[in-house]
Amino acid sequence: MTSKLPNTALLVMDLQNGIVSRFADKPEALLPFRQAIEVARSRGIQIIYVRVAFREGYPEVSPNNKFFGAVTQRPQGMTESDEATQIHDSVKPQPGDVLVTKRRISAFAGSDLEVILRARGISKLVLTGISTSGVVLSTLREAADKDFELQVLSDACLDADPEVHNVLMEKVFPRQADVMTAGAWIESLNEA
């Protein structure tokens, strides 16, 4: 049974080679992402991949930015064409998916994400990504302020600090989003 959900988008955030590689010892961690993507695709839900990348020479990176200032000194490049910024093969975009490039932590910062969402009439976002305390938190806060309806797939979010992940999922995110596992989200689609 295929039902279109034209007002919904699944955001797959920062599942790019240079970030996914931090979890190389846990390949099973990407399974909930793959399941959510597969079901979203089969149900006609718009899939939007978000990556962080910069132009050659890093003109967007200020030395005053404590987090991104160090990017220009890393041996692994973070420009739009570098391998580190390409979406990981295990969740590779397909025709019809959208790729958004952001310049900061939030998926909205320095990107055209909001233009794409508004142009497509999308009002509901399902958030997944690496890391929970980075892109997911920043995007959730900004999306809530922009009045999007939000869901977060708890097991399709990863963080280097499991305690921070749990606090965000259990205490912070539920104030602005419905938090559920990828399996529970898939089940809710089947019930709709």
Image: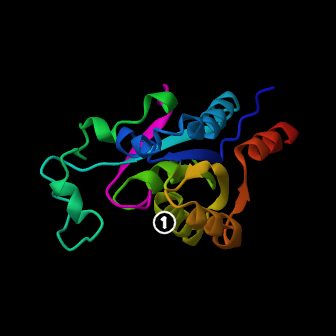
Q: Is residue 101 left or right of residue 70?
A: right
Provide the residue designation for mark 1: 138
Q: Is residue 165 left or right of residue 55?
A: right
The residue furthest right is 191
Q: Is residue 131 magenta?
A: no
Q: Position of residue 89 (x, y in %)?
A: 44, 28
Judging depth in this view, the residue of 130 and 104 nearest the camera is: 130
Report the predominant secondary structure element of the magenta stretch: loop
Give the quadrant of the C terminus. top right
The residue furthest front is 25
Judging depth in this view, the residue of 190 and 8 nearest the camera is: 190
Judging depth in this view, the residue of 22 and 65 nearest the camera is: 22
Q: Is residue 3 left or right of residue 83?
A: right
The structure residue drawn at horizontal position 70% and vertical position 41%, both measured from the top left corner, is 5
The structure residue drawn at horizontal position 25% and vertical position 47%, both measured from the top left corner, is 78
Visible residue check, residue 168: yes
Task: Give residue 45's quadrant in the image.
Answer: top right
The segment highlighted magenta reads: 92-108
Q: Position of residue 105 (x, y in %)?
A: 39, 61
Q: Position of residue 83 (x, y in %)?
A: 28, 35
The structure residue drawn at horizontal position 20% and vertical position 52%, both measured from the top left corner, is 74
User: How packed is label 1: few (under 14 Cα within 10 Å), some, or many (20 or more)?
Assistant: some
Q: Is residue 94 magenta?
A: yes
The structure residue drawn at horizontal position 44% and vertical position 47%, both measured from the top left corner, is 14
* Callout count: 1
Residue type for callout 1: Ser
Element under label 1?
A: helix
Judging depth in this view, the residue of 179 and 101 nearest the camera is: 179
Visible residue check, residue 96: no
Give the quadrant of the N terminus. top right
Q: Position of residue 71 (x, y in %)?
A: 23, 56
